[in-house]
Image (cartoon, rainbow, N blue to C red):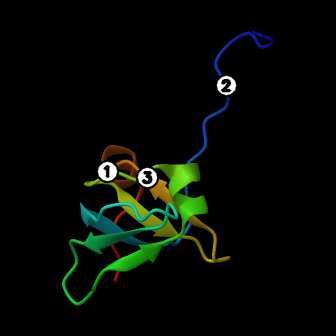
Amino acid sequence: MCCSGEMPKYRSHKVVHALKIKEMGEPLPSGDCMFLPEDKGFDWIFLPAAYMRKHDPEVGGYYVVYEDGYTSWSPAEAFEAGYTRID
């Protein structure tokens, strides 16, 4: 390891859009997939193969969209520890 001591700490101040994943559909031959959010009022949401390969989302985690449009996935524990719902 190149560093000595504890690394600096950071606190998130980002505002994101997110949906908790209730159910994952079966992957398509193309690698694309769909997920059903826990939040009411949302239908199945499409996830392209590139997203699936990069993030490997799981039920219970969060599909996250940042202000610049970047999409990600976060495990529930990490997401819920760092974000509070503001509607």
Question: Residue 27 placed where, x, y %?
Answer: 38, 61
The alpha-carbon separation of the residues under discs 3 and 2 comes to 22 Å
Quadrant of residue 22 within the rendered picture: bottom left
Disc with the residue nearer the chain's start (1 vs 2): 2
**Which residue is depicted at the point 42% across and 65% down?**
28
Left or right of residue 77, residue 7 in this image: right
**Which residue is depicted at the point 64% across and 18% down?**
6
The residue labelled by disc 3 is 74
Which numbered disc, 3 or 2, marks the residue closer to the eye?
A: 3
Q: Residue furthest bottom?
A: 41
In the depicted view, which residue is nearer to us: 81 or 23? 23
Please say if 23 is above or below 1: below
The residue labelled by disc 1 is 76
**Which residue is depicted at the point 29% across and 64% down?**
21
Q: Can see residue 13?
A: no
Q: Amino acid at mark 3?
A: Ser
The alpha-carbon separation of the residues under discs 1 and 3 comes to 6 Å
Q: Secondary structure at mark 2?
A: loop
In the depicted view, which residue is nearer to us: 23 or 60? 23
Question: Residue 68 placed where, x, y %?
Answer: 68, 76
The residue labelled by disc 2 is 7
Pointers 1 and 3 in contact (C-beta within 8 Å): yes
Please say if 87 is above or below 83: below
Pointers 3 and 2 in contact (C-beta within 8 Å): no
Q: Amino acid at mark 1?
A: Ala
